[in-house]
Amino acid sequence: MLVPTATLAEHRRHQLAREGLVFRPDAVQTFSRFAADLAGKLAAGVKQVSEPLFQLIVERTLREVAPVEFEPVSDAPGFPASVADAIRRLDAVGVTARDLGRICSAWRYAGPLALVWARVEERLSNRGIALRAGVLRAASAAEQASGTLLLDGFAKFSAPERELLRRLNALPDDDVSDVLHSVPCRKFVADSEVREAEEVARRILAAAERGTPFREMGIALRNPERYVAVLRPVLERFGIPARFYFSEPLAANAAIRYFSGTVEAFFSGWEHEHCLPVLRLSPRFEPDELDAFDFAVREKIPNTGLAALLQLADSHRGLTRLIHDWETLDKNWQRRVTPLRWAEQLSLDLRNSYRPAALPDRQLAGTVEWERARAAAVELFEAALLETATDWPPEQVPIPLALFWPRAKTVLEHTALRPSDKRRNVVHVMSVYEARQWALDRMFVCGLAEKAFPKRHQEDAFLPDEAMEKLQRAGFGVETSADLDREEEKLFRQVCRSARHELCLSYATEQKNGPSAFWIATGGEAEPPRPVRPAVRMRGHARRNASRIADSALIEWAAKAKPAFSVTALENYLGCPFKYFTLNLLGLRAAPLRPEKRLNFLEQGNLVHKVLEEWLPERRAIRPVFDRVFEQHCAQLRVARGYRTETAYATMLADVERFAGESTNWPFHEACAVEKKMTFAIADDITINARIDRIERLPDGRLVIIDYKYSNAKNTKDRSEDETRLQGPLYVRGIAQGGETVAAMVYFSLKKSAEAFGWGVVPGLKKELQLLTPEWVAQGAAEARRAVEQIRLGLMPVLREPGAACKWCEAKDACRVGIAEAVMTAGS
């Protein structure tokens, strides 16, 4: 029995075994394997070239031939893969390089493509390997074995395949029918792809409860690049065993990303920016063990060298051991050895550096699957490197790693990782191309939205439809874009035919696309999806109010951790209790920014404050002060000099010079305090810490409190009118407790214009301020006391809806704003 794919071959073996039939495993095999065995019987022993080696040969041929027509895109990362794909597609239908050059010479890119293809064929022939059509031709020429062939699951055959079948007297009369037989069809529409996946999971569980085995259900995807990432976690949450019939590039696996990242870090001279993501991939450490080290490294970027990394990792034994391993690699990889030796050396060195720990018992199915894929990737890595070495002549000479590694990267990117999964009773998740070959009790077809299924195809990048039509008239089974569009309907019918008892169609409106033509053509009414969530198993005492700290020990710890409160902390609590909980109580902070982004709005404000602190006492030329402070600040933050930095420099310089020029409008007197720190009480057991930018004394002895805001006039005005802001009344309260009288509390906006907002009266200031009254001060103090009381009770309520400030909040990635109802329902 011959079938199109290895997965279908395995499925048929399981089906026959369950029916009690005894047979050799190779009695059911793929057409490709059968043809390769026949071709191998020839004296020359023709073998099919592997995909990674084919990519290497195409890349090298493109560099050597270098057609001028391809020059504008020759450096594009995906161009060699596009050329390889074009050659492979034409070869599959029996076209040769000579045919292409002869028939399509009128088209610009046909000649260069044929030239590259001919050189590739020459190199393949010299190695005794060929593309698929070459293997099929060799199999047709081989001596045929006796026996009966059964063909199962094929939609159509190419010309080389039909020739081989004709030689074997096994050619079917016609292609497989695509007539859609009648089975019950159910449909539903979901508002998102996640809800679509959840409804599919609910229906699978309902079918399983009615007696349908998981192995008799399948999910067909036309856009697996979108749906696999959604379906995998959803099916795992619902406890549904599933096998995903999709491979991924070996280079995408976490273990191989660690291997590749280590080599790239070596080439960078151990740049810390390259090293840090690699360390994150190491299986030796838990993520929380790396956090402090991660932040320390980010703060020092740009930085290089393993010695500097060791200094930052001195308290982490595992990190220290790994960096010492890297020092050994650094010495080993400076040499010149043969390509074969590089393959062996890299595999040994990187596997020794990786060393994953043993997986504990009783792990989730998803974790086991992930670990199985990682183990398979590590084994396949060595084979990929050995295949890279075959791209050099047999008489290998020593080369540096810099010559070997680029080719190894190409092989890793085009080597498919397919971890072994021997589970039998699983839901089959596959592409529509795979699903059309199967026959299952229930088939779910997802993503029937407009522009998704059917897909619309563009003309071939190398050969337009006119060229394809000329090849068709010459007898080759190539397809134009219109042919491919028509094939979509045939594909849909074949997928629907794979359902024996029930078919379920669905799509999501998340992308604002309506239903596709296929959805409409099936008719019938769509059923509404039911609200569904997997059961959450929680111990009784674990169910608690999610917006309150109820543990008395934790409340006592919080009181000791915060014996006094800053004005900013209390404003954070009144604006968003979760922000206070995250940033002020727990003391969490966001990861340090990249060097080019470190001069953000916060740091610009700090820099401008420092400039004014130094300039205001003497009021000389402000630019020299600004330049000196700017250089010091950038050096301290290790800011990268570039467009962002220069733009920020010009903007801030213009703002401080404008302020200096307009400062004569302010009735300045000698400041009695700059950056004044003070501590005061608003109740017997509540202490407030504050720091005031500047305090000036008027001729009548009263004080003016000044707080500089590096923001525009609108934001500064909004701040002065925001009732959750306590800075104004608490500053006045603190100064008044010292026996002084406050005439005004002023916010000075410095960005784009120098404007004052606030409370009180300042003689000579051409700006009307709000009233500064005892009631206003008392109200601010009362709000601060209320905030402290709620904090000490452990109240951390969750906001229902996000606000304008959420966009800039450092805690937004851990925030629960907008999901309050779900949090309260789940109890966690």
Image: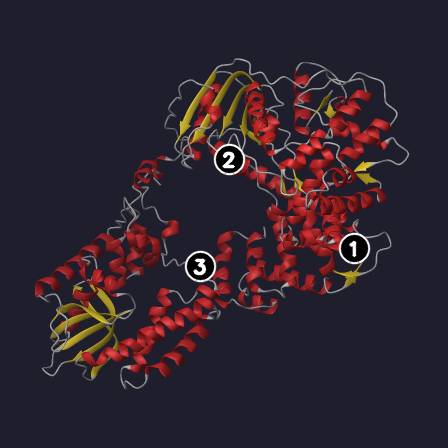
Q: Which residue is mark 1?
A: 339
Q: Residue at the location (26% across, 55% down)? A: 573
Q: Amino acid at mark 1?
A: Pro
Label 3's element?
loop
Residue 48 in percent (x, y) is at 78, 37
Visible residue check, residue 564: no
For marks 1 and 2, give the CA distance. Answer: 40 Å
Q: Residue at the location (46% across, 32% down)? A: 450
Up-down relation of residue 586 to residue 34 (above or below): below
Q: Which residue is mark 2?
A: 227
Q: Amino acid at mark 3?
A: Ala
Up-down relation of residue 351 to residue 690 (above or below): above
Mark closest to the chain's N terminus, 1 or 3: 1
Q: Which residue is mark 3?
A: 591
Q: Amino acid at mark 2?
A: Tyr
Could you say which is closer to the camera, residue 361 or residue 266?
266
For marks 1 and 3, give the CA distance. Answer: 41 Å
Q: Is residue 756 left or right of residue 18?
A: left
Q: Quadrant of the N terminus?
A: top right
Q: Is residue 791 left or right of residue 504?
A: left
Q: Is residue 67 left or right of residue 749?
A: right
Residue 622 in percent (x, y) is at 33, 82
Visible residue check, residue 791: yes
